[in-house]
Image (spheres, rainbow, N blue to C red):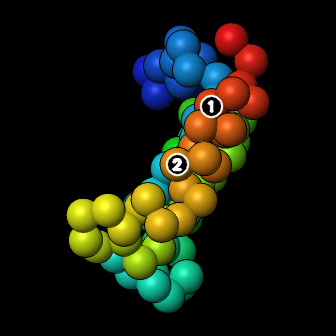
Amino acid sequence: MNVQEEWRNEFQIKKLALLLVGAATLPELFDAIKLQYQLVLNYFRLEDAGMVLVRGVKDIGDIKRTKALEEAYNLGLSQKP
């Protein structure tokens, strides 16, 4: 077993979630980040716990006008301890 393989096997985290907030409004602008997220999941053999993607948040208070905080909260509640 090489060093990389050994390191991946010792990785304590088994699930990963993506919480992404940005000013961009076009869904395509988040695609590169989602792709990198998927690569990390694959490399470390992690389970996807879910994603909360929030577009169009650039000013103070913008996020309060979305359902993102509720979605993030619910995503957290859905995870087994």
Image point (59%, 37%), residue name = 73
**In the drawing, what numbered circle is on residue 69?**
2
The vertical placement of 16 against 23, above or below, is: above
Separation of marks 1 and 2 at Cα, in angstroms: 11 Å
Q: Amino acid at mark 1?
A: Gly
Q: Is residue 42 visible?
A: no
Residue assigned mark 1: 76
Q: Is any part of residue 50 visible from this angle?
A: yes
Q: Quadrant of the C terminus?
A: top right
Picture disc at residue 32: none
Q: Is residue 14 above or below residue 41?
A: above
As drawn, 17 above or below 2: below
Q: In which quadrant of the rendered image does the N terminus lie?
A: top right
Q: How many marks?
A: 2
The kind of residue tagged 2 is Leu
Mark 1 vs 2: CB contact within 8 A:
no
Q: Secondary structure at mark 2?
A: helix
Q: Position of residue 72 (x, y in %)?
A: 58, 44
Residue at 74 percent across and 18 percent down: it is 80
Q: Which of the two discs, 1 and 2, labels the residue nearer the N terminus?
A: 2
Q: Which residue occupies 47% across, 73% down?
A: 55
- What secondary structure is marked by label 1? helix
